[in-house]
Image (cartoon, rainbow, N blue to C red):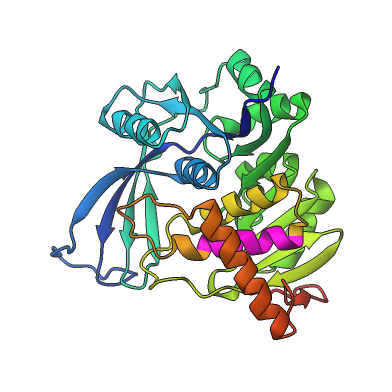
């Protein structure tokens, strides 16, 4: 089949209700007056990856289970308005939803509604095969029932990326994703020894690239058995919300890979995209465009070359070196 899609995104379509709180953790009180208000909008991990890839000029298609409900209408409208093809499977329990508490510094705490899905949920295999046959790459979100598509994607021969988010390196649910993807993203947030976890993923699974994002400390890339560090970049505006930053990082990184860039340079693409995402209010779903990203990457490379840094900060030596 003729390839009509650059990236097929599987899973992670849903709706967030954004609640701005005076601080995190939120002290107990009978009530709080919330400003600038409470807003519900479409946009969870898969939506953000699809939006980010689309904004970067990649032909993107999104597949997920969506309910016949108000939240589903918001997801459908988001994709329709942005011009991103969406294939939906019916979800009788309703569209995924969450409440995000956002602090003044942009940090957020997400509360996911675990009732909107069931262990028996499955995508129609013929639909997955049809979509992946027209795709160059697949990005798999760790929502149900995406783990069951991994063997089909492998059989189709496309490269696969996934984001484990704040995996602790132990929870068995994440292992199917961690060990069956070619490119694995995760956060260092819940890891006691990030390098050990990264090497374990690469050693036991299929991953040839493992990336651990560390917020203001930048990111770490394991590639060709070498661990390198990419320093963070200065966001182009004040930081207002970290929600979606990891999804933006993955989008920027995948753009670089599909353009044939060295993974070490792809990490800078992701870093720039993630920094931009932190400047976007949680009530919006804007993503950095291709021209702006590439211009900023070139600018950072020039600055770091002048400082003798290069694209990355160089190898990280020794086990546990990401502490």
Give percent across and percent down for residue 242.
43, 63
Asked where in the image residue 42 lies, by quadrant, the reply is top left
Residue shown at the point (74%, 32%) measured from the top left? 158
Q: Is residue 61 left or right of residue 310?
A: left
Quarter where residue 169 is shown:
bottom right
Q: Is residue 316 above or below residue 250?
A: below
* x, y percent for residue 88: 45, 23
Q: Identify whether 104 is placed above or below 223.
A: below
Residue 33 position in % (x across, y down): 13, 64
Q: Quadrant of the N terminus?
A: top right
The reply to whether the magenta stretch includes residue 68 is no
320 versus 64 height, above or below? below
Left or right: residue 43 compared with residue 56: left
Relative placement, left or right, of 33 versus 135 is: left
Residue at x-position 29% and y-position 72%: 23
What residue is at 58 percent from the left and 63 percent from the top?
Answer: 295
At 40% from the left and 70% from the top, the residue drawn is: 239
- Please, what is the dominant secondary structure of the magenta stretch? helix
**Extreme-right residue of the structure:** 224
Farthest residue toward the bottom? 307
Q: Position of residue 115 (x, y in %)?
A: 38, 34
Residue 100 seen from this side: yes
Residue furthest to the top = 126
Q: Is residue 323 visible?
A: no
Quadrant showing the C terminus: bottom right
The front one of 30 and 221 is 221
Q: Can you tell which quarter of the image residue 60 is in?
A: top right
Where are the magenta residues, as a range?
Answer: 264-274
């Amino acid at each position: 089949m003729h390839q009509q899609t650059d990236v097929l995104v599987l899973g992670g379509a849903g709706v967030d209700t954004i609640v701005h709180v005076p601080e995190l953790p939120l002290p107990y009180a009978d009530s709080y007056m919330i400003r600038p208000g409470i807003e519900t909008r479409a946009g969870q991990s898969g939506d953000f990856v699809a939006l980010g890839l689309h904004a970067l000029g990649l032909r993107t298609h999104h597949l997920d289970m969506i309910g016949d409900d108000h939240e589903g209408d918001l997801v459908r409208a988001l994709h329709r308005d942005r011009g991103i093809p969406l294939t939906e499977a019916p979800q009788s329990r309703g569209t995924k939803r969450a409440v995000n508490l956002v602090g003044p510094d942009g940090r957020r705490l997400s509360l996911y509604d675990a009732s909107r899905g069931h262990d028996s949920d499955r995508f129609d295999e013929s639909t997955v095969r049809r979509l992946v046959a027209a795709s160059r790459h697949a990005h798999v979100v760790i929502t149900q029932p995406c783990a069951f598509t991994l063997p089909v994607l492998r059989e189709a021969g496309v490269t696969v990326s996934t984001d484990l988010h704040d995996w602790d390196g132990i929870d068995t649910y994440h292992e199917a994703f961690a060990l069956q993807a070619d490119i694995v993203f995760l956060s260092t947030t819940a890891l006691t020894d990030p390098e050990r976890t990264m090497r374990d993923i690469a050693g036991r699974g299929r991953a040839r690239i493992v990336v651990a994002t560390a917020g203001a400390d930048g990111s770490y890339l394991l590639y060709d058995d070498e661990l390198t560090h990419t320093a963070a970049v200065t966001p182009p505006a004040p930081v207002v919300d970290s929600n979606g930053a990891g999804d933006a990082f993955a989008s920027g990184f995948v753009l670089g890979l599909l353009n044939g860039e060295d993974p070490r340079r792809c990490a800078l693409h992701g870093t720039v995209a993630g920094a931009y995402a932190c400047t976007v209010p949680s009530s919006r779903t804007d993503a950095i465009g291709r021209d702006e990203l590439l211009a900023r990457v070139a600018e950072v490379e020039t600055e770091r070359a002048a400082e003798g840094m290069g694209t990355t900060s160089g190898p990280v030596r020794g086990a546990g070196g990401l502490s």
